[in-house]
Image (cartoon, rainbow, N blue to C red):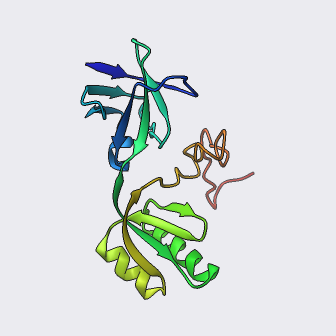
Amino acid sequence: MLTLHTKIPSADIIAAQLVLPYELREKCRLRATLDTGEDVAVFTVRGTVLRDGDLLTGEDKRVVKVVAAPEPTYKITCADAHTLLRCAFHLGNRHTQAQVGDGFLRIRADAVLKEMLAGLGATVVEEKAAFEPESGAYGGGHSHHHDGPLAPIPLRQKIHRPGDTA
């Protein structure tokens, strides 16, 4: 079985594609099947998220391209930026992973969230689409836009208590 464990920035030859939904691209240990029918084991560092277009390789040096599989999602649009921002706030308040696009948000299909968003004035359309949510402020940013963290990562946070003296 082919074992993949290293991300590489580029390759001249792509041997196969690994088509996965986001839920499986979050896993650090995974057994899957390539588009060629070959079984593959994927081992990544805990916390690694495989993104659409990532290239993986292993001991035999073959390169496999990760492809985001279409999956059930909702595309959220609004008549104005303020309403879209309110929707983003309420999704974030519920710790919902969201993809941020040009004038839209995309989330995994969830009937309860769909109802909430419609109540906020959003247009929510069901679609099968590749899901590429934001990685979060401390997740290193989205790989296509940032080279490092979006914000400083505290090593140890000091909590100020009213009785503390300076």
Q: Is residue 93 above or below residue 48?
A: below
Q: Residue 88: where, in percent of width, then height?
A: 53, 71
Residue 107 located left or right of residue 159: left
Residue 26: tell me if it is visible: no
Residue shown at the point (38%, 49%) measured from the top left: 22
Quarter of the image that includes the N terminus: top left
Residue shown at the point (61%, 57%) measured from the top left: 161
Q: Residue 72: where, in percent of width, then height?
A: 32, 62
Residue shown at the point (52%, 50%) measured from the top left: 135
Q: Is residue 8 above or below residue 126?
A: above
Q: Residue 8: where, in percent of width, then height?
A: 53, 25
Q: Quadrant of residue 70?
A: bottom left
46 or 23, nearer to the observer: 23
Residue 40 located left or right of residue 166: left
Residue 112: tell me if it is visible: yes
Q: Is residue 77 above or below residue 47?
A: below
125 or 15, nearer to the observer: 15
Residue 122 located left or right of residue 29: right
163 or 11, nearer to the observer: 11
- The residue lying furthest to the top in this view is 60
Q: Is residue 68 above or below residue 91?
A: above
Residue shown at the point (48%, 30%) measured from the top left: 55
Q: Quadrant of residue 47?
A: top left
